[in-house]
Image (tube, helix red, strand yellow):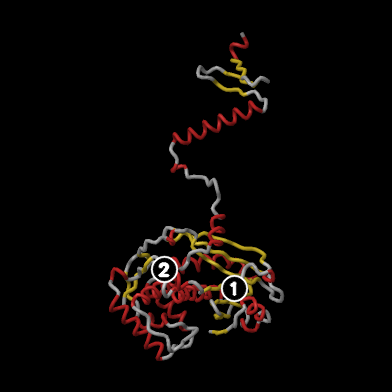
Amino acid sequence: MAGHPQLNQVKSKTERVPYSGTFFIVEISYHNIDGIDGYVVGLKFYDQSNSTDSAKVARVHPFGLGRIVAQTAIKMILPDLDQISIFGFYLQTEGLEARRKGGAARKKEMYQAKALLMHKDVKSKLKHLTRFEVDGGLGWTMSEHDYSSYPQLEFFERELAKQLEVILC
Amino acid sequence: MLIRIETGELIEFPEDLAARVLIDPFSDDGDKPALTAEEVNVALHSILGTYFDPDLSREDNIKAVEEIYDQFKPPSAESLRRAQESIRAYVREVKEADIGSVDSDYLKLFSATEQERQFAKSLIKPNKLRDFSDVSTAEIADIARKAGQEARQESLNAGCEVVSEDEQGRTVTTKKLPDGTEQKIVKGEAED
């Protein structure tokens, strides 16, 4: 969501996380949105190096990758939890099949596991875990109030330019 | 059934819980095909690898995974049947050496876009200080000597007098003259 003028970004935090000979970047951005008391916080993470572009295919053990990213993100936001109203992240699935067969499903599984793990640490404040599905991607949010009750939902929908399907757990 | 944890060790994990982990708790749609053995290998290890806390026992980790899925309503019988079928394929087909390992194409899914890569590069500070243990004594001496020579030259260019000790231990004062030549005055000799 970063970059949209109505998503007034007020601050961001970045951590470099070493993992299996490369680094992952975990980026948290804080936004002030009209009508929402606390911050709306977005998470992004990605591999820093070019190493994975190598044509040589090796065997790797991804065990622990999702955890290290989720824990880093949680450590970054916990000190501000009292001031956060919505925390979420988005997975763009477009183009993933070209990178790897079944890529969209595999990446979605790990992102969802991260969402479920992170929600355990923030649910005292951000009770509602929601997944929304849109064309070309999907997102997970943890929010203080039922996500579909936010009047700004329409704005989020418009911003994502997609139909929103809210599934509560 | 066996899964491989971060230490490389194989541990026993309950098959029913593994099947439950494979079912999307947000979208229990009944017409998805069963996963192949290799897909299960990747999916299970990336999901359980996210949940597993290396500081907890196997039993406590299993309990923590159960708690995550107990928040959701139970899956449909059809979804459960299909997930169990996928687990059986994993148990049957994945060789012990391959448990928990996937091809490196998997990590490509997390590669940065060009824009993200540029941002990541900007986080690496140029002229990063090296650890002393990475640098030889001779290299440190060379860096110090060059730094000294540069400082001396800059001082002279700025019109300052540079006081140094020569090889015989005498105090030498050097000054740059307007014609560009350097004038050296040896302390003992000047007094004479």
Q: Are marks 2 and 1 on the same chain?
A: no
- The disc placed on residue A23 is none
Number of dots carrying numbers: 2
- Give the residue at mark 1: A87
Measured as percent of width and height from the top left, residue B15 is found at 34, 81
In the image, residue A71 sits, relative to residue B87, either above or below, namely: above
> Can residue A112 be seen in the rendering of this structure?
yes
Closest to the camera, between mark 2 and mark 1, is 2
In the image, residue B168 sits, relative to residue B133, either above or below, namely: above
Chain ID, mark 2: B
Q: Look at 43% across and 77% down and name the residue there.
A: B65
Examine the image and state in which quarter residue B186 appears: top right
Secondary element type, mark 2: helix
Query: In the shown orientation, is residue B139 left or right of residue A160?
Result: left
Chain ID, mark 1: A
> Which residue is most to the right?
A34
In the image, residue B30 sits, relative to residue A87, either above or below, namely: below
- Give the residue at mark 2: B106
Residues marked 2 and 1 touching at CB (< 8 Å)? no
Q: Look at 36% across and 69% down and name the residue there.
A: B102
Measured Cα–Cα span from mark 2 to mark 1:
27 Å
Q: What's the amino acid at mark 2?
A: Tyr
